[in-house]
Amino acid sequence: MLTLEKEPIREAIQCLEKAISLCCKARKTTTFSESFSSWIWTVDYEDYTDEQAHAELCYAESQTMMVLLTLFETQSLMSLIKGAFRLRASHHSYRLCEKIMYGKTKWTSEIARDDFECGVRMGNGIINLILSFLPAKILKLLSFVGFYGDAKLAYRELRKSLSLKKAVRFRVCGFIVIAYNLYLEQILGIGEGNIEWAKEVLDEIINKFPNAVEIYSRCVKLQNEWKQIHNICYWDLCWCHALLCNWKEAATYADLLQKECEWAPAVHAYQSAIFNLMRIKDESNGNELKEKVFKSMECVSQLRKRYAGKTFPPEKLAVVRSEQYLREKISIDCLLVYVSFQNDLFSPRSSSCIDSFQEYLYVWNILALSEGKTEIIEPILNNINEKMSTIERKENFDSYALLLLLKGVCLRNLGDHQEAIACFKTIFEIEKQLPKKSYVPAHAAVEMALTYLRIRNTIEARFWLEKAKHDYDKYLIEAVVHLRVHSATKLLKKIEANEA
């Protein structure tokens, strides 16, 4: 699945089919009379042998992995239907495993018992964690088929799973907790991941395996087959350099990702373009860089991919912005003023006035991670202020509103909440002048709510969350708003519960 290449995915599916077949042979068979009687009498889970219990758990895990691979193999309706049935089978097996975990007391060894419990709690925890992350609209649909997302239960189950340190799945569970808190919650949520818990788990794994860092470093240097592991590092290095304004290095890693990573290649091409755009002001080889930017922008729409029939929101934004850039460049060429355009690529009227770099920082939620870090925020804020001083507000309301949104987030991260609120209010004052499908007002409502949450004004926070959720629809990157509203609502409920 890390490769997203058809041949490895097919091979993985074949291996999982064999694993499922093997699990089915080892699982406890149930006759019709036993199935019927289970509705009347309590099932005796002591009848399950250790092998049958573990076979049920492995079957559930294999079905879960098969769901992911099925969705990525093809983008057809049939694959979605197959995935839904497999997910239901996996969910049913995990529920059965949970009953076995509580009902079976006789095990051949404590290790077998711990391995089983660790796997069951990890599976239940992951399913509940992922489902709890989904917006309420999707959860309502899933509840009809028996899926519920309980974040508190998820955290409780994962903590219990991690307490079984000798279990074979301990490290897997640890890496999932780390990945969720450092990536999924940070990028798709509101930056409220439990960093302390992730650090605690990571320290525990390092203490348990003190030479792990050295071994992994050697593996990275020696192995060339699993480049997907390298790509995770390239991604982090790309944005670390970008935040430090090392544009050349950031562009280099974006180019590497475009060549070697099958995940969202359009995003990597677009990121390479925007980092090279930032280089033009500071470097002498401007014409060469402009040509490179144009080629990168040109291939973005061709590299677009769909996952489970949908385009990933940052990729959709990359396609729209690249097409906008190309349209404006071509229209200027037709007016025979290409030379002046090249000499003023950062003019307010060019597509770059939207400030692609800061916009993408916002979309990936990297701005949220910079809270309290003055050395990162101030250069970004200075750049935004510089652009706002040159932009003609009356002629480009959408770009001006976007800059206000970005400025408000930066000010909130510096702790200047009232100034941040003033920026967001200005957006709503000019809302009627914005294009009908502008995404800025919806995001401004979310950011207004988050700012009020910072100062513990839950009444205003709830008002703005409801506005973001119900007052806007059919705009660019709408899914990002719904995910952030959902995460913010969870935080709001938590604050209200603590204050009660």
Image (cartoon, grey):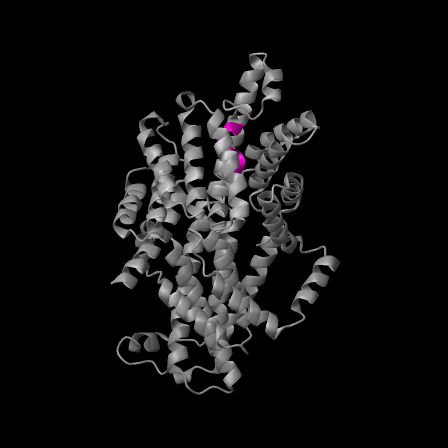
Q: Position of residue 143 (x, y in %)?
A: 31, 58
- Determine the image quadrant of residue 144: bottom left
Placement of the C terminus among the 4 image quadrants: bottom left
Does the magenta portion include 232? no
Query: Residue at the location (48% across, 33% down)?
Result: 385
Height in image: 492 above or below 477?
Answer: below
Relative side of 37 to 262, left or right: left
The overriding secondary structure of the stretch rendered in magenta is helix
Outermost residue toward the right? 222
Height in image: 496 above or below 346?
Answer: below
Height in image: 167 above or below 276?
Answer: below
Relative side of 9 to 473, left or right: right
Height in image: 327 above or below 41?
Answer: above
Q: Position of residue 457 (x, y in %)?
A: 29, 51
- Determine the image quadrant of residue 416: top left
Q: Position of residue 48 (x, y in %)?
A: 43, 81
From which residue to which does the magenta span run? 352-358
Q: Is residue 180 or residue 6 the one in the foreground? A: 180
